[in-house]
Amino acid sequence: MTLLTPATLLGFLIATFWGAAFHFVLGGGYRRLFRFLLAGWLGFALGQSIGQLLENEIWVIGTLQVFPASLGAFVILFDTALRTAGNRTRVR
């Protein structure tokens, strides 16, 4: 039994993309980038779990619940953006 299935890898890549996209749009330093990546991963995992519990059928790729997972990532990412809004120093 391997933990790195194709669905897990795709989910990790999508969650990383959402976190990096938020950082690209909103800016900030390396710490804020790390927080956005962590928030994207956590939110995506939570959304995936909720999608499986609710037996979602909207935008599913194999076993990956893309729609609820992305929605969960957005919720956590928006929360992280609001909590780190005052911490937008850029590294020069």
Image (spheres, rainbow, N blue to C red):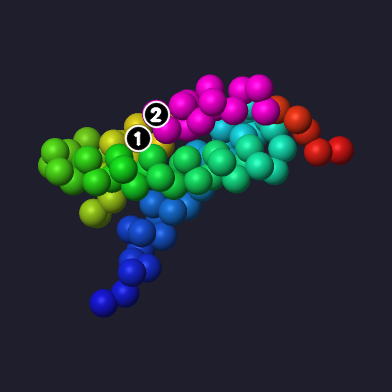
Mark 2 lies on a secondary structure that is helix
- Magenta part mainly helix, strand or loop? helix
Distance between mark 2 and mark 1 Cα atoms: 5 Å
Residue 66 visible here: no
Quadrant position of residue 43 = top left
12 over 5 or under it: above or below: above
Part of the protein shown in magenta:
75-87
At a point 65% along the width and 34% down the height, the residue shown is 24
Q: Magenta span has 81?
A: yes
Mark 1 lies on a secondary structure that is helix
At a point 28% along the width and 45% down the height, the residue shown is 48
At a point 40% along the width and 45% down the height, the residue shown is 42
Q: Which mark is residue 19?
A: none
The mark tally for this picture is 2
Q: Magenta span has 8?
A: no
Depth check: give the residue in front, 2 or 62: 2
Q: Where is the C terminus found, in terms of image quarters? A: top right
